[in-house]
Image (cartoon, rainbow, N blue to C red):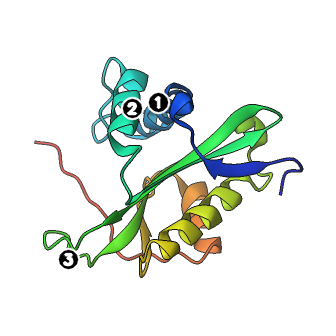
Amino acid sequence: MKEGLVIRPALAGELPEVAQLAAKLLELHHALDAARFFLPERVAAGYAWWFEQEFERAEVVLLVAEHAGSLVGYAYARLEERDWNQLLDACGALHDLWVEPSVRREGVAEALVLAVVSALREKGAPRVVLHAAAANDAAQAFFARLGFRRTMVEMTREL
């Protein structure tokens, strides 16, 4: 793991900066498949609004990776109820994971994921579920190394 890396809960005052990181994640997904992943005009502002809504909720985990005084990554997860549409029992869901390119392959993502898994376990989650973009083979391999397994494949047809 990167020396001096700190994984911790995000602070309220950091939400705009976390939203900037989240915007990069959405832009990546949009670049991978523009027909599937929407890209609103004010991505960071939208994420800032969303994180403000989620920030105080007990079922939410919003962590940041800090190195040398800068935020270099974040993870957003939450407890989810049983979803009959997806045939998915109650779980912890890792919704977002972003690490700045300058510190990738230095253990930041792994540290974030392990911290999310631990936090969700403490909140009572029996499992953690996530989605990875079909075109992001590196992310899929990374999550598999951490013990995640494929359970569903989303397929889309444009009309």
Q: Residues within 10 Å of mark 3 (few under 14, many from 20)?
A: few
Residue 39: mark in rendering: none
Which residue position holds label 2? 47
- Which of the two discs, 2 and 3, labels the residue nearer the N terminus? 2
How far apart, in angstroms, are the residues tagged by discs 3 and 1? 30 Å
Query: What kind of residue is marked 3?
Result: Leu
Q: Residue furthest bottom?
A: 126
Q: Is residue 118 left or right of residue 45?
A: right
Query: What kind of residue is marked 2?
Result: Tyr
Instruction: Note whether 110 is above or below 122 in the view shown.
Output: above
Give the percent coordinates (x, y) of residue 73.
Answer: 64, 42
Write the residue at 17% across / 43% down: 158
**Quarter of the figure with the N terminus:** bottom right
User: In the rendered image, which quarter is residue 146 located in?
Assistant: bottom right
How far apart, in angstroms, are the residues tagged by discs 2 and 1? 7 Å
Write the residue at 34% across / 29% down: 49
Write the residue at 29% across / 61% down: 154
User: In the rendered image, which quarter is residue 82 located in?
Assistant: bottom left
Query: What kind of residue is marked 1?
Result: Ala
Which residue position holds label 3? 87
